[in-house]
Amino acid sequence: MSPGRWEIGRRKHPGCVAWVQLRAKLRGLVVDAAGGEVALERECFAMARGEGGCKLVQNEELLESLREVLGEFCERGDEKFMEVAEGQPFRVTRTSCS
């Protein structure tokens, strides 16, 4: 979230059971891919320092797992997360970390 648009104390995210479960599942995938909580924290600091971090965002297996979970979640509604919308040139899948 943009700190210039929403003050930290006013930021909110959905708190219903489905969203809580989604966040827990996504976090679990990331923690497992990192090799545990401590390794995840180290990876976050490595990315922040630019010291060869980004292993997680370059992990294609993790990215595909995250896409699948998000796709299943989003396709419960009207949105089709896994499809490129008509008139759009592409589906954004990740941020480059170079």
Image (tube, helix red, strand yellow):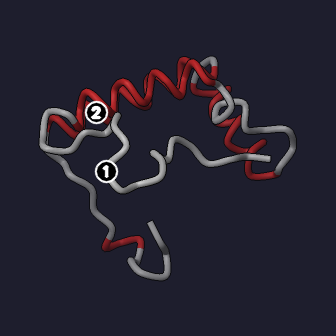
On screen, residue 47 versus residue 27, left or right, reads right
| Disc 1 residue type (three-letter) | Glu
Q: Residue at x 80, y 47 (%)?
A: 98
| Numbered marks: total | 2
16 vs 37: above or below:
below
The quadrant the N terminus occupies is: bottom left
Residue 86 placement (x, y as % from top left): 31, 50
Which residue, as the protein is rendered here, is positioned at the far right? 51
On screen, residue 12 versus residue 47, left or right, reads left
Residue 16 placement (x, y as % from top left): 13, 43
Q: Quadrant of residue 84?
A: top left
Q: Residues within 10 Å of mark 1 (few under 14, many from 20)?
A: few
| Disc 2 residue type (three-letter) | Leu
Q: Residues within 10 Å of mark 2 (few under 14, many from 20)?
A: some
Could you say whether the residue bearing mark 1 is in a helix, strand or loop?
A: loop
On screen, residue 75 versus residue 58, left or right, reads left
41 vs 64: above or below:
below
Which residue, as the protein is rendered here, is positioned at the far front? 87
Tell me which numbered mark, 2 or 1, is placed earlier along the sequence.
2
Q: Are marks 2 and 1 in contact (CB under 8 Å)?
A: no
Q: Quadrant of residue 58?
A: top right
40 vs 19: above or below:
above
Q: Residue at x 49, y 82 (%)?
A: 4
Q: Quadrant of residue 22?
A: top left
Identify the residue position indicated by label 1 in the image: 86
Residue 53 placement (x, y as % from top left): 78, 38
Could you say whether the residue bearing mark 2 is in a helix, strand or loop?
A: helix
Identify the mark at residue 22; answer none if there is no mark: 2
User: Of tags 2 and 1, which is closer to the observer?
Assistant: 1
Q: Residue at x 61, y 23 (%)?
A: 60
Q: Nearer the viewer, residue 5 or 97?
A: 97
